[in-house]
Amino acid sequence: MRPSATDSIETLRRQAVRREAAAAAEAAALQTREVLRQERAVIAATYERDLSGRWHRRGEIVVAADQPGAAEAAQKLGLKEIRREVLPAAGLTLHTFAAPAGMKTEAAFLALKAARPDDAVDLNFVYVFQAVRTSHVHPLVHADPGAGAAGRLAAVIDTALPEGAPALAGVALRARRFGPGVGRPSDHALAVAAVLADTAGRDGLVLLAADVSEPGPLPGASATAIAQALDWTASYRVQVINISLAGPPNAAIAAVVRRIAARGVVIVAAAGNGGPRATAPFPAALPEVLGVTAVDSRLRIWRRATQGSHVDFAAPGVKIRAAGGEWTGTSLAAPVVTGLLLRPGVTPASLAHRARDLGDPGRDPVFGHGYVASRE
């Protein structure tokens, strides 16, 4: 049976639609490849990896010093000072130097470290945010705000916080940008801050929002930006600092943490999403920092949580509803502990005493002292 004219027109129409769809798909694929090519070019121009494969800002060496002479020593080695910041709370000066052309960054770092053995010298490593949004959800009414107290001051070192977000209603914000270029507001920072506020209670809560995000396509924050943000928040006599970032050890960050922790500032950090056998990430692995891991609603350890002696507490961190999304990661567990430490009379010691023991009896590398939550 021969096809009718109507059938032939319909067949031609379908063929045309398929050709248009194929052309659109090919154009989209070309556009995606071009975007990825451009992003790879930007990353290659801005960042590099050390011999262990860890990302750092290309050619940059950072020095935290409490004595003069770092710039002169670097100049003798051919390094150029590109930034200098005074860190008043830590009593340190933060220098950033660029390795000279033709010298590998790690070679320049080792030379300067040998020349200044008493300073904190390191590469300007990049630290990664420790949560991903698994789905979008409808905004929820904030539950059980806890016991509030006036004049409580905490800090969130993360990406930029969006202004006027309903998730932070009732919370006073003071924001500052650190790092090069323009910061990027993100739902990651908003989710972290919302969990903190829900746990601590919003009455009289003031959050210092330090935006340390890198402007380029590599998501994370540099060591220099984190060190500056730590000092800025400590200058306000903040009670607790939350850092939902993880990365390599860094001498400059360690020096700043050591100095401000000695002033009584409590620092809480995500214990890491690298998996149970991954190397303990920093800053959570520093002895002055409280590392927090993530468990699900049945108090099971999250499968990608990093385990080790750096883990101090376990808190909810799997499928957490916050800031219009559902999130999973140790990023969302850390602000639970930060928020609890803002409640009246709560200290790291009292929190460890009241923690619900999980796993092996006593403190262990999976759950630390045990499980804590806003309603425990």
Image (spheres, rainbow, N blue to C red):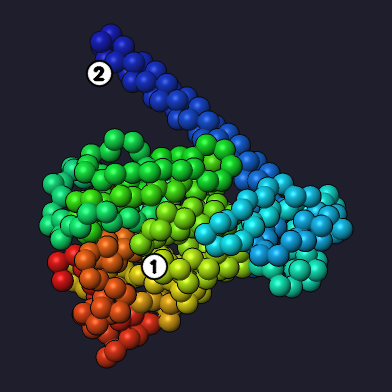
**Image height check: is 309 above or below 247?**
below
Q: Would you say 55 lies left or right of 178 here?
A: right
Please give the name of the residue rendered at 30% of the width and 50% of the height, measured from the top-left corner.
206
Name the spot of residue 258 as percent of width and height, x first: 52, 71
Name the spot of residue 210 as percent of width and height, x first: 44, 48
- Classify mark 2: helix, strand or loop: loop
Q: Quadrant of residue 295?
A: bottom left
State how many labels appear: 2
Label 2, label 1: how far apart the Cα atoms are: 83 Å
Name the spot of residue 294 as percent of width and height, x first: 31, 68
Residue with the mark numbered 1: 266
Say which amino acid is labelled 2. Met
Could one spot residue 38 in this view of the protein?
A: yes
Crowd tier of the residue under label 2, counting other residues whose Cα lies within 10 Å: few below 14, some 14–19, many 20 or above: few
Q: Which mark is residue 1?
A: 2
Say which amino acid is labelled 1. Val
Please give the name of the residue rendered at 32% of the width and 75% of the height, measured from the top-left corner.
348
Q: Quadrant of residue 352?
A: bottom left
Of the image marks 2 and 1, the number of the one nearer the N terminus: 2
Q: Which mark is residue 230?
A: none
Image quarter of the C terminus: bottom left
Please give the name of the residue rendered at 48% of the width and 30% of the height, measured from the top-left corner.
28
